[in-house]
Image (spheres, grey):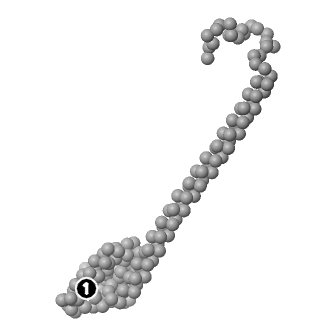
Amino acid sequence: MIPDDASQLIDIDSPVDAPVEGTAEERSAEPAASAREEDLEAALAERTADLQRLHAEYVNYKKRVDRDRDVARLKGVESVVNDLLPVVDAIEAARQHDQVDGGFKLVVEALQKVFGKHGLVVYGEVGEEFDPHLHEALMQVPLEGDHTTTVISAVMQKGIQMGDRIVRPARVGVADPN
């Protein structure tokens, strides 16, 4: 900043030991104030870093708790589904013998809605391609027809899948092209 009064301008040609304005106390107070400011800024930076670290820990904790809650919920649903597997097998047996009618048909439809709500899928049909990740082969028969891949020739027990997770693999007989 250039002062309004030109007499306050520093003369470059003047000697180095020119008098400095202000008292000695004022000159020594400036470095002390500057040091205090630096200390305060360092303390502020430290507290800010602590606060950021604490916030990150809280966010990670919340994610972990949410994930654990979802896992516990899925395990609970899976436990109930495992308990209901004999019911699913009885319904499949009744379907194979065309005995799903009347009031029993309403119960089956209500159960299917509940299964659909929780993402449960019953799978395993004759003619599907065999997948060892989804199916459990219990027997093998020679392939009849013009298939080039291993296919399911008989279904002993349907498989149950919940989302991406296999609750029970389908137990099947396979027809091998070899």
Q: Is residue 41 above or below residue 136?
A: above
Is residue 151 in view from this perspective? no
Residue sitting at x 63%, y 51%:
50
Report x, y in % for residue 12. Answer: 72, 10
Residue sitting at x 68%, y 10%:
9
Residue sitting at x 51%, y 66%:
65
- 171 and 44: which is toward the camera: 44
SS at circle 1? helix
Q: Is residue 43 above or below residue 154?
A: above
The N terminus is located in which quarter?
Answer: top right
Q: Residues within 10 Å of mark 1 (few under 14, many from 20)?
A: some
Q: Is residue 43 above or below residue 66?
A: above
The amino acid type found where label 1 is placed reads Val
Report x, y in % for residue 175. Answer: 32, 85
Q: Provide the residue designation for mark 1.
A: 107
Report x, y in % for residue 114. Answer: 31, 78
Q: Is residue 7 above or below residue 136?
A: above
Report x, y in % for residue 81. Answer: 38, 82
The C terminus is located in which quarter?
Answer: bottom left
- 105 and 55: which is toward the camera: 55
Residue sitting at x 56%, y 54%:
55
